[in-house]
Amino acid sequence: VPPLGLVSDSVTETMPSSHLTVEKEPDQPVRVLYCPEPLYPAALGDYGFTGQVDFRFVVDTSGIAELDDMVVSEAGHRGFLNAARRAISKCRYQPATKNGQPVRVLVRQRVVFRTRGSDSTRR
């Protein structure tokens, strides 16, 4: 397991084009309807690491995260990335709206991991 340290994705320096074509001022923001608890990676379990992964991604008009252009803003450990992405892929959202119509918007979401025996949460 690589040493614990702050991970920043180099992709954050250039924003994907899909992030630029979203509604910037919706009338109603995105709302989380369901997001499962992330599974703590077994490979990190023996080390007792805690950490978080911060993502930027687009929620589409059907309330699903667009995973292809998901950007990692920050991660406490690389070992959390896949589990965090899996958790986000299962989340469902009430899409943002503009003039009563669903619109695509850019969101930020954090997935938090705590050691075994404690809870994992998202913010």
Image (tube, helix red, strand yellow):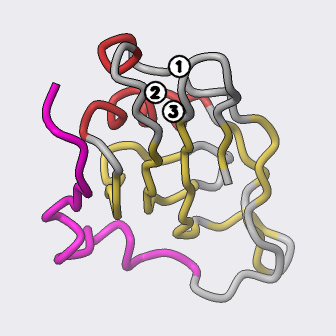
Query: In the image, what residue occupies the spot 79% across and 51% down?
Result: 94
Give the left or right position of residue 19, taking residue 27 as reference: left
Give yes or no for contact between labels 3 and 2 (Cβ–Cβ under 8 Å): yes
Q: Toward which corner of the image does residue 81 lie, by quadrant?
A: top left
The secondary structure that most of the magenta stretch takes on is loop
As helix, strand or loop, the secondary structure at mark 2 comes to helix
First of labels 1, 2 by sequence position: 1
Q: Toward which corner of the image does residue 46 lie, by quadrant?
A: top left
Depth check: give the residue in front, 67 or 81. 81
- Residue 35 position within the rendered picture, expressed as x and y whole percent measured from the top left: 70, 35
The kind of residue tagged 1 is Leu
Query: In the image, what residue occupies the spot 23% across and 55% down?
Result: 7
The kind of residue tagged 2 is Arg
Give yes or no for contact between labels 1 and 3 (Cβ–Cβ under 8 Å): no
Q: Residue furthest front?
A: 47
As helix, strand or loop, the secondary structure at mark 1 comes to loop
Q: Which mark is residue 73?
A: none
Query: In the image, what residue occupies the spot 34% across and 64% down?
Result: 73
Q: Is residue 117 above or below residue 32?
A: above
Q: Which residue is mark 3?
A: 89
Q: Which residue is mark 1?
A: 39
Q: Which mark is residue 86?
A: 2
- Residue 10 position within the rendered picture, expressed as x and y whole percent measured from the top left: 13, 64
Q: Is residue 43 above or below residue 15?
A: above
Give yes or no for contact between labels 1 and 2 (Cβ–Cβ under 8 Å): yes
Please give the range of residues in magenta: 1-23
Task: Please tell me how crowded label 1 is: few (under 14), some (14-19), or many (20+) other residues with Cα within 10 Å.
Answer: some
